[in-house]
Amino acid sequence: MINRHRRTVLWTSAAATAALAASGLAVGATAAQAAAGCRVDYAVTAQWGGGFTANVNLTNLGDPLNGWAVTWTFAAGQTVSQAWGAEITASGASVRAANVSYNGSLGTNATTSFGFNGTWNNSSNPVPSAFAVNGVTCTGGVTPTTGTPPTSAPPPSSPPPSTPPPSTPPPSTPPPSTPPPAGGAIYAAPNGTAGAAGTQASPTTIAAAITRVGAGGTIYLRGGTYNLSQTVTVAAGNDGTSSARKNLYAYPGETPILNFSAMSEDPANRGLALNASYWHVRGLVVERAGDNGIFVGGSNNVIERTVTRFNRDTGLQLSRIASSTPRDQWPANNLMVSVESHDNADSDGEDADGFAAKLTVGSGNVFRYAVSHHNIDDGWDLYTKSDTGAIGPVTIEDSLAYSNGTLSNGAQNGNGDRNGFKLGGEDIAVNHTVRRTIAYRNGKHGFTYNRNPGAMTISNNLSIDSTERNFSFDAGTSVFRNNTSCRFAGSGSNDKTVGNVDSSNQFWSGSNGSRCATYSGALAWSFAADGRLTVTLGGRAVSL
């Protein structure tokens, strides 16, 4: 499950300033006057036709930096189209990523992260071979630098800048475009301690903050990687209210990464377990847990702008907290909005989906503007079993599943079901709703009833180039309206739809319908500023 587009680089001081200046890129002053050393970890975290997402972690191993700029050169014509956590500029293949106002101070052994969406040529997307920070080439080790500092730098006799190093959180004033956090908030950071006050100057841990926050209160997680070995649990009963949720938010403009790579693969080793109700979780990345990345056992929660990746079971799953949990306490009325889940894989290859609301969930759970891709099993799994009975109806709308059954590194497992949307199990009828949603090049079916004979509502959906059927519904009384099925590559099988089917649908039975002409070409997607999912095919926006 290791992403093949990853490189870690150690850098130390070297006489590279002149070469960098010659390229037209600005050079910072700090590294030219102090012991310098750093680690750069560049990873392609998602890739699709014509586009990709990369995350970059910068760790300072030398003296504190008061301003940084990471530079590299793309080797295959890649470009940057959108960035966060850094100001990124480019001149041809040369790229410069400079700190923004809240993350410029980087103390010894401190880490900051930034990321970007970019374009590539659909042939080769190699990781840059070398990086530099403030003009210092990546060569390995920590050494004192020499040389005359640039004229814009303060002379060596000047007192150090007043901005604190990153071991102290950034100043309380975030970027001008971001409203400041409300007073009374609790702050947690990768270097926080359980007994700390939970202020910006003295941040606490995630686990400690969760036990302290009151209804209507907010926990802000500072950016960086939280290396965790135990499940972070929001216990049942630690609830907000319908008018005053408890909030667990990324600090504005920063990306907290909850990394559970220290866990072994085990059903007990979840990442974040949200067993309480009336919480709002926003902006977190949860990765490499021994089971689910995010598990939701509570009700009336909002999960927004999260990424669950490289976990060893389903990325984000809803199910009852325990086998003793009564049916009326199964998780209900949760909203998952503008969320992404990818590259989740278990060792057996048959359980790790992108998203799941299965086995034991109540009614009213909604996935909106959600994207599931490159998971070893299914994109979505709404499985039911006879020993627990029917689950509550689930709504999936304005969402996307693609390339499920194959990880980003090309790995597959023959045990995986590999569907885009798996909507049932064991001949138990549940009336789910799936609308305005896209399945693209999944490893088995695009949309499948999977032995759910219920009266599902399947409307305004698009399925393209599934390995077998784009739409596979062998039984039931589902209602199908305005759905479109297209094939541009591979042979596949004719669609099968049993139920209430009228002429508004264009299913595939050997040839494409007229609507398919507007759905050819490479897939690309992004989240708009308001969280809405934007999908294009061949550069044309898809509207369903």
Image (cartoon, helix red, strand yellow):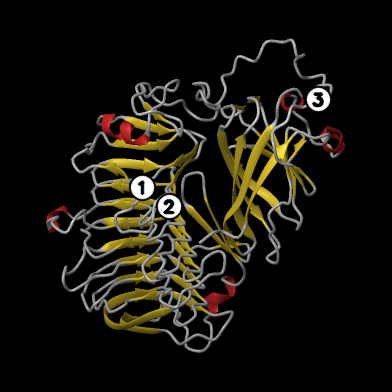
Looking at the image, tell me whether mark 1 or mark 3 is earlier in sequence order: 3
Q: Which residue is mark 1?
A: 303
Closest to the observer: 440 or 185? Answer: 185
Residue depicted at x 47% and y 44%: 530
Image position, residue 325 (x, y; %): 14, 55
Q: Which residue is mark 2?
A: 339
Q: Amino acid at mark 3?
A: Thr
Closest to the observer: 475 or 541? Answer: 475
Image position, residue 47 (x, y; %): 59, 60
Q: Are marks 2 and 1 in contact (CB under 8 Å)?
A: yes
Whether residue 96 appears in this view of the structure is no
Q: Please, what secondary structure does the residue beneath circle 2 have?
A: loop
Closest to the observer: 419 or 270? Answer: 270
Above or below — where is 401 with respect to 499?
above
Closest to the observer: 338 or 512? Answer: 338
Above or below — where is 83 with respect to 403?
above
Q: Residues within 10 Å of mark 3 (few under 14, many from 20)?
A: some
Q: Residues within 10 Å of mark 2 (few under 14, many from 20)?
A: many
Image position, residue 469 (x, y; %): 44, 82
Q: Quadrant of residue 48?
A: bottom right
Q: CA distance from mark 3 to mark 2?
A: 47 Å
